[in-house]
Image (cartoon, rainbow, N blue to C red):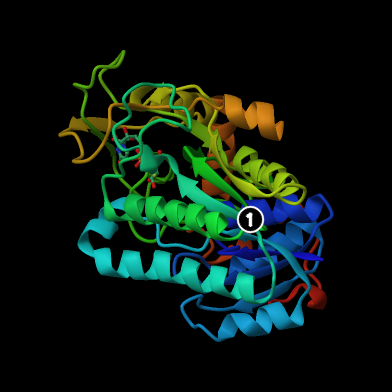
């Protein structure tokens, strides 16, 4: 029995594949590399020294998924594949709605067809919009403020309807807070296309000298130092949360929603200080206008995941910053190039080459 991972070459997907393989799961991975790199597949194999099947598949291509379900004994699906840039989603709403929602509909149709009714879905804290209070619990009001967030919210509702129509489904919806950091090997991390939108990759690119200085978006928020506060969570902690969710859905039915966050908030200035300490690099910054759509404070109440899944974030802000910096400093250009890096792991063999094995 295998776990199907859609978007397994992405930032969170790839780290989750590693945890799954290390825990002994058989996995089948799909990606279309819209926002990720093929090198990641080899890197996962290199780090884990494990083989798995990989398919280059666009979930919007209705027929391509049949092959995957027919060729493999799939037990559950972890669905990461999606477009994810908040700003871009406002310029290209149709692409976001079509890509994120239609692909999920197609995936669920195929799951129903092949009687695979266990699903873990990647949602986001963005579904809470401007939170009424922090920490944010799962039963807080939902009101996403941009097309990206609305795709996540609409899919959550679709999944609730799906379960209401057929009680054999077992669905876990995971609302991520702000994932940062990288695999401790330094071989796998976040590699955004173009200039990063998110804080941590922007900071690491300033530290490596690719960007001149960080623009801090606003210092007039009602927070300790006036800058925005977020719940940063190590991507490996987040990945482990998916394994806990998987254990959960394989022995019960229903739809459950969990926040995956640490429950602690850090301001932008606190993040700069933490990163400077972890990396020994100075991060020049300038306070600029606040970014439209940003909220002042957003951090999770992670108690439900703790109690029901037995999951809790274990890695603190120093480790997050250290790992982010290790990844960036070993890979100044992300996945483009890695020939010159010295791998702490052995050289991949023929078996580890990418392809539909
Ligand atoms: N920030 C800056 N300068 C930058 C980038 C960000 O000051 O160059 C600030 C933001 O204003 C905010 C904080 O850093 O206060 C974090 O911003 P990010 O862009 O890193 O993250 P967001 O909280 O805005 O959004 C992220 C993801 C969303 C997801 C959300 C969940 O991008 O997809 O977390 O909470 F929905």
Report how many numbered discs are placed on residues in the image. Answer: 1
Of residues 60 and 44, the one drawn nearer to the viewer in this rendering: 60
* Quadrant position of ligand 1: top left
Please report the residue visible at 80 percent of the width from the left and 57 percent of the height from the top: 25
Residue furthest top in the image: 224
Badge 1: how crowded within 10 Å, few (<14), some, or many (20+)? Answer: few
Residue 78 image point, x, y percent: 62, 58
Of residues 349 and 357, the one drawn nearer to the viewer in this rendering: 357
List the residue tagged with mark 1: 167
- State the image quarter where residue 98 is shown: bottom left
Residue 233 image point, x, y percent: 53, 34
* Left or right: where 240 falls relative to 204: right
Please report the residue visible at 45 percent of the width from the left and 62 percent of the height from the top: 82
Residue 312 seen: no
* Left or right: where 4 falls relative to 129: right
User: Quadrant of the image for the C terminus?
Assistant: bottom right
Of residues 298 and 153, the one drawn nearer to the viewer in this rendering: 153
Task: Please tell me whether residue 100 is drawn above or below residue 278 in the rendered image.
Answer: below
* Left or right: where 56 falls relative to 92: right
Q: Secondary structure at mark 1?
A: loop
Of residues 110 and 290, the one drawn nearer to the viewer in this rendering: 110
User: Quadrant of the image for the N terminus?
Assistant: bottom right
Residue 214 image point, x, y percent: 29, 38
Residue 21 image point, x, y percent: 78, 56
Please report the residue visible at 35 percent of the width from the left and 50 percent of the height from the top: 149
* Left or right: where 93 falls relative to 25: left
Residue 121 seen: yes
């Amino acid at each position: 029995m295998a776990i199907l991972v859609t978007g397994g070459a992405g930032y969170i997907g790839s780290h989750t594949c590693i945890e799954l393989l290390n825990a002994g799961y058989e996995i089948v991975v799909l990606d279309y590399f819209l926002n990720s790199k093929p090198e990641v597949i080899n890197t996962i194999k290199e780090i884990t020294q494990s083989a798995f099947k990989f398919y280059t598949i666009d979930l919007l291509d209705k027929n391509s998924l049949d092959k995957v379900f027919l060729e493999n004994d799939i037990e559950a699906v972890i669905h990461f594949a999606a477009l994810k840039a908040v700003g871009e989603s406002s310029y290209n709403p149709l692409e976001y709605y079509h890509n994120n929602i239609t692909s999920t509909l197609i995936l669920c149709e195929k799951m129903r067809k092949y009687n695979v009714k266990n699903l873990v879905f990647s949602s986001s804290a963005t579904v809470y919009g401007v939170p009424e209070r922090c920490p944010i619990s799962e039963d807080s009001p939902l009101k996403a403020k941009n097309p990206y967030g609305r795709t996540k919210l609409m899919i959550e509702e679709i999944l609730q309807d799906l379960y209401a129509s057929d009680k054999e489904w077992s669905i876990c919806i995971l609302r991520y807070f702000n994932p940062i950091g990288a695999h401790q090997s330094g071989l796998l991390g976040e590699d955004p296309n173009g200039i990063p939108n998110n804080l941590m990759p922007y900071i690491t690119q300033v530290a490596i000298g690719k960007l001149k200085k960080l623009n801090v978006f606003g210092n007039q928020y009602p927070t300790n130092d006036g800058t925005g506060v977020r719940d940063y969570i190590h991507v490996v902690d987040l990945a482990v949360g998916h394994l806990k969710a998987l254990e959960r859905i394989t022995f019960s039915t229903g739809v459950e929603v969990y926040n995956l966050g640490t429950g602690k908030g850090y301001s932008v200035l606190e993040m700069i200080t933490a990163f400077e300490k972890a990396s020994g690099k100075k991060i020049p910054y300038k306070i600029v206008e606040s970014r439209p759509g940003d909220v002042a404070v957003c951090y999770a109440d992670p108690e439900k995941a703790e109690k029901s899944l037995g999951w809790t974030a274990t890695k603190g802000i120093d480790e997050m910053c250290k790992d982010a910096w290790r990844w960036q400093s070993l890979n100044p250009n992300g996945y483009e190039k890695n020939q010159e890096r010295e791998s702490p792991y052995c050289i991949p063999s023929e078996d580890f080459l990418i392809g539909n094995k």
